[in-house]
Amino acid sequence: MFHSTRAVLLATVFALAPTGAALADPAPIRIGVTLSTTGPASALGIPQKNTLDLVAKEIAGRPVEVVVLDDGGDAGAATTNARRFVTEDKVDVLIGSSATGGALAVAGVAQEAETPLFVLSPIPFAPGREKWTFSLPQPAPLMARGLFEDMKKRGVKTVGLIAFNDGWGDLWAKELKTQGEALGLTTVADERYARPDTSVIGQALKILAAKPDAVLVGGSGTAAALPAMTLRERGYAGRIYQTHGAVTRDFIRIAGKAAEGQVFVSGPVVIAARLPEANPTRPAGLAYTTAYEAKFGKGSVTLFGASIWDAFEILKQTIPEATKSAEPGTPAFRDALRKALENGKGFAGAQAVYTYTPSDHYGIDERGRILITVKNGDWAPLD
């Protein structure tokens, strides 16, 4: 009788006690983010860091742990940060960096560590090196075509280029040489400058001497304002075109009157409220704009911060799929997440509709591109 009662009691205790699996907290999702919150690309990195205050803190019932480090816009520092994320923090996802050089550096670490990466600056994918890297910004060829088609429509024949003397500038020089020439545009000047430069008078004088119908500035952040200001000060009256890297409020503030009338290619989020109701990016764009401006002030939204928002919106849809087959913190989970990203049916974000496939890790089409200008100190749709 005693043994029987004891057996019943033990059975009851074990039945009522939680199992080890139930007692254990679910494995967190760890995300490593390297940004340029200081240095010449800080106009991009600061809104990206700000956006991290607004993103999901839990996905699929699991806490999201985000580690953020500043790389100052330096590719070497971005590499160091990324290596720390994968070796010490054991992250499941990498995000970064704000500038092209840093993004390329982190992509190399992602490839070696076999960890999914969302890059925040457009980069060229080297053949066979794109497996773990997914682009959030619109690819340069897509955006360049929008600018060059507008040039052609407005009768531009000759173009002067002034661009960064780094990977970002090289991207635009390449697109002008290939797509631009195919549309009948001739490059009559190709001048370069460094991101920290405080004067481009010499480069501007050479461009003025070439008398181009239009000038393309291959810069980003506030550093893209310097060539345009200098050209206007020296009397250039032609149309000035800017890349999506220059679409910041700080650009308008610094360039002042020189910003007026310039043409920018951009993601749609900066004028989300003025997009057509049927535009698939409008709901996410309005959600992001509302959340960001509630915390950081009216008119503070940038397309750079929106890329961080979109990364987390995509993860909210793909992490639940990945956790069906593997636990976070494992190589199997990272591979499952990569596959979930590649097999999505289209993620409608604030900046674009992302449709990644095994052979296309840009995943963005014309729905992620608009042309805007500056009118009375504010962004406006191009006429």
Image (cartoon, helix red, strand yellow):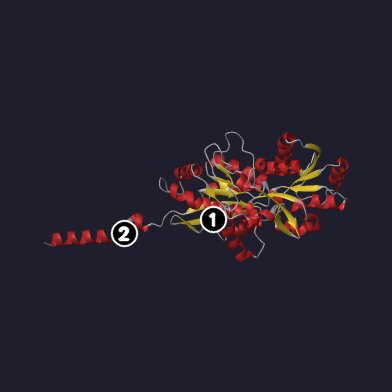
Mark 1: few/some/many CA within 10 Å (<14, 14-19, 20+): some
**Element type at mark 2:** loop
Amino acid type at mark 2: Pro
Q: Where is residue 382 drawn, in percent x and y? A: 71, 52
Q: Where is residue 301 drawn, in percent x and y? A: 64, 59
Mark 2: few/some/many CA within 10 Å (<14, 14-19, 20+): few
Q: Say which mark, if any, is on residue 66.
A: 1
The one of 263 and 122 positioned closer to us in this rendering: 263
Amino acid type at mark 1: Val
Q: Residue furthest left?
A: 1
Q: Is residue 351 toward the left or the right of residue 158 in the image?
A: left
Spatial CA distance of label 1 from label 2 is 30 Å
Q: Say which mark, if any, is on residue 190.
A: none
The one of 225 and 147 positioned closer to us in this rendering: 147
**Element type at mark 1:** strand
Q: Where is residue 197 drawn, in percent x and y? A: 79, 50
Q: Let me know if residue 367 appears in the view.
A: yes
Residue to which mark 2 is pinned: 18
Q: Is residue 305 above or below residue 125?
A: below
Whether the residues at callouts 1 and 2 have beta carbons within 8 Å, the answer is no
Q: Residue at x 71, y 38 (%)?
A: 175
Q: Sequence-wise, which precedes: disc 1 or disc 2? A: 2
Q: Let me know if residue 164 appears in the view.
A: no
Q: Is residue 129 toward the left or the right of residue 263 in the image?
A: left
Task: Residue 19: name its quadrant.
Answer: bottom left
The one of 165 and 299 positioned closer to us in this rendering: 299
Q: Is residue 234 toward the left or the right of residue 153 in the image?
A: right
Q: Is residue 130 toward the left or the right of residue 204 in the image?
A: left
Q: Where is residue 353 drawn, in percent x and y? A: 56, 48
Q: Residue at x 41, y 55 (%)?
A: 26
Q: Quadrant of the N terminus?
A: bottom left
